[in-house]
Image (spheres, rainbow, N blue to C red):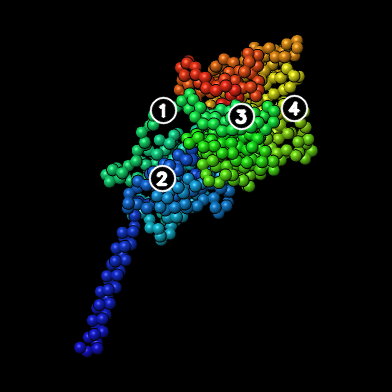
Amino acid sequence: MTTPTKKRQLLVIAAAAATAIAGTIGLLVVSAIPDYRTTVLVDTSAPGADFPAIADAVGATLHNTGSGDAVSVRRFGGDCGSADNTAELTDDPVEARPALQSLHPSGRATLLSGILAAVDDFTGVYPFRGSERNRIIVITTTGTDACTADQGEVSRTIQDHIRAAGLTIDLRVIGHRVPEDQRATLTSLSPGTAFTDDPAQLAVTLDELAIPQSPEAARIKVTAPPPKPPAEPRFAFTTIDKLGVVEGGRVTAQADVRMREEYQTPTPDLTLDGRFAFAANAPGVTTIDVESGAGRTIPCDGCVKAVPVGGSRIAWVDQANRLMIADLAGAQAQQPVTSVALPAVPPSSDYADQPARLQAGAEGTVLVTLPDAAGTAAYGGPEDLFLVNLDGEVRALGTTDSNLGVGVAAIAPDGEAVAYVRGTHGGSCEERYTTTIVSTGSGEVRTPGAVSPDFDSDIYGGMVAAWYDGDGVLNRINSTWRCSQLNEPTYIQRGSHERLVGDQWAVQYDSPVLDSRLVGPGTRAAITAPTPDTTDVSPDGGTLYVEVDGKRVDVVVGALAIAVAGIVR
């Protein structure tokens, strides 16, 4: 065989091999192109309402997408203009849930930055775009972009960005627990914007948007899990030396606590997810896992109060005036939030060496008070009010108009208002208290049911508790009395449970109580007043009982206060 013939044969073989390789590569490329490509963009900004449910819904839905689909998860939330206020978390459906569960909502709602970055994810050569459809599904708990003054500009900027990239993208939006007055911006982003109010609605809506509507997809469509049977009512309580959990009318777990000083009694609380009971006391913050009953105490540098701030997280203020966070579900015992700078007591104040006083907590935020710079009376008031988000944003809410320090306060579940008990002291018996509500948006102050300032009366009163219930309605425990000739209180109304209806207080439960909570349908937990003549919280406490449809069962003697999961106090 001549040399030219051999060369021709080699060329033919090489050409055939090249064709085969090219065909294989082409086949691999074609097979790698997904039918659908979906990016789920999740709002991880503070306060992060219902964030655990969002993580669960995203994880469940992406786990059930078709094998020929490509999915990824991106988050948004952080500082305006910061490069890390949005980031891709994973493109593995199995890792979606743990990736989200590892995050704690923080920062501002950088909605626009998140969507623009999600659009840019589709502009590269790889990962491949979907052959049939490309879409971005936004799940947000806030209705606005925190970094854009003109919210109408958000939608225009996004559409211009998509057109400039030469892309065709379906943008779908789910607003989860978004207040009515914040929904307009989200509706302008997508004509099919959906709004959900509970985890079951969110799961079903996300399935409908993320899983392709085809016979094959229909067979793997996720539906909301069947409702669980009602759980036994569960709540927490404290005595002078115990933190306890009650379920089904009996004590199921207890841990030792100790008073810091006389009458600084431990106050119980539960994390917002209901997994842990806790109370600040002399050794630190004592906690109980309500499922296992396991207890532990976290050192807190002499903190006076601890509050829930979302999920299994709690917060307190240490002696260095730092806001500290502990995730009770995590392995790390405590975690300083170094980015949160709390307001400081003015140097001219007699209280300059004291940290800010932590008053209340809610999802992603706390309420603190400081002695007013203009001067504070011997009884602790007036005080300046500050709402502090966990991303470091501080909002001044004005000054209390009283000569007593704030002792009882609560933040509304939607964050739109704070309430505090305003007190004036005129003598050992002569004290008057009212409940004041401050709008966190406008700063408007109102005092429902208050008498005129010039009202001359010998009727005095006090309040030992105030809280927002599961419906977002303010409640309180209120007492009224007259002062006797011996300057001692003679009670007119002893520790009644009142609920704010419109602009008036309506009595819900008028038996003399130290504390009272609805803990389930037809079920009330209450603590009797320790003596017929007083409802003051004393180390003696009262009898804790559970009342179901009018039938009372005593649980423990010497109880001081009650806490129910999901109720902000």
> Real-space Cα distance between discs 4 and 3?
28 Å
Residue furthest to the bottom in view is 2
Which mark is in front, 4 or 3?
A: 3
In the rendering, which numbered label is found on residue 241?
3
For the residue marked with disc 2, what is the amino acid?
Answer: Gly
Mark 4 or mark 3: which comes first in sequence?
3
Q: Label 3 crowding class (10 Å Cα cut-off): few <14, some 14-19, many 20+?
A: some
> Real-space Cα distance between discs 2 and 4?
52 Å
> Real-space Cα distance between discs 4 and 1?
46 Å
Q: Residue at x 63, y 47 (%)?
A: 338
In the rendering, which numbered label is found on residue 379?
4
User: At which x and y percent is residue 51?
Assistant: 49, 40
* Residue bearing mark 1: 230
Circle 2 SS class: helix
Q: Is residue 259 left or right of residue 309?
A: right
Q: Is residue 199 left or right of residue 568?
A: left
Mark 4 or mark 1: which comes first in sequence?
1
20 w.r.t. 454: above or below: below
* Residue bearing mark 2: 59
Q: Residue 507 lies in what quarter of the image? A: top right
- Quadrant occupied by the N terminus: bottom left
> Real-space Cα distance between discs 2 and 1?
25 Å
Q: Are marks 4 and 1 in contact (CB under 8 Å)?
A: no
User: At which x and y percent is residue 447?
Assistant: 64, 23
Q: Residue at x 35, y 47 (%)?
A: 65
For the residue marked with disc 1, what is the amino acid?
Answer: Pro
Q: Label 4 crowding class (10 Å Cα cut-off): few <14, some 14-19, many 20+?
A: few
For the residue marked with disc 4, what is the amino acid?
Answer: Tyr
> Real-space Cα distance between discs 1 and 3?
31 Å
Residue furthest to the left in view is 1
